[in-house]
Image (spheres, rainbow, N blue to C red):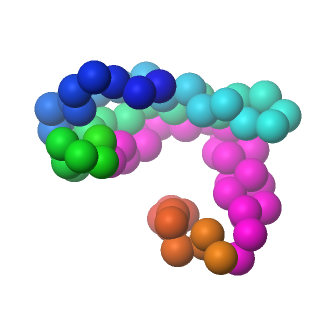
Amino acid sequence: MKLLFPLPVGTKVDVRIALPDGEAKAKGVVRTLDPTLGNGIEFTEMEHASQEALELCLHEFPESTSGDFEIIR
């Protein structure tokens, strides 16, 4: 979802990420705000099945894009 304006840091959000085989759902909090790039969101709660589906999808990205994200446990 694209927003007209980024959300303030500290805003709690419900996140739904469309994946090729379904979706991943999580709860999160806005940690960064950049007016030109948008928000950085920290996932605070995610069901195990959603986490596994998201990690599988991210690992299928080509090697050339691997620097665009990082999985932190």
Seen from the viewer's position, the closer of residues 62 and 50 is 62
Is residue 65 visible in the rendered image? The answer is yes
Quadrant of the rendered image containing residue 33: top left
Asked whether, in this view, residue 12 is left or right of residue 21, the answer is left
* Residue at x-position 51% and y-position 66%: 68
Q: Quadrant of residue 4?
A: top left
Specify the farthest residue to the right: 21
Q: Specify the quadrant of the image occupied by residue 53.
A: top right
Residue 51 counted in the magenta span: yes
**Placement of 45 over or under 59, stated as above or below:** above
Q: Is residue 46 magenta?
A: yes
Q: Which residues are magenta?
A: 39-63
- Residue found at x 84% / y 34%: 21
Where residue 34 appears, x then y in whole percent? 20, 48
Labels in figure, total: 0
Q: Is residue 34 above or below residue 5?
A: below
Residue drawn at point x = 47 percent, y = 36 percent: 45
Give percent across and percent down for residue 69: 51, 63
Could you tell whether 30 is left or right of 54 in the image? left
Left or right: 26 with respect to 30?
Answer: right
Is any atom of residue 31 visible in this view?
no
Residue at 56% in and 26% down: 16
Q: Nearer the viewer, residue 43 or 7?
A: 7
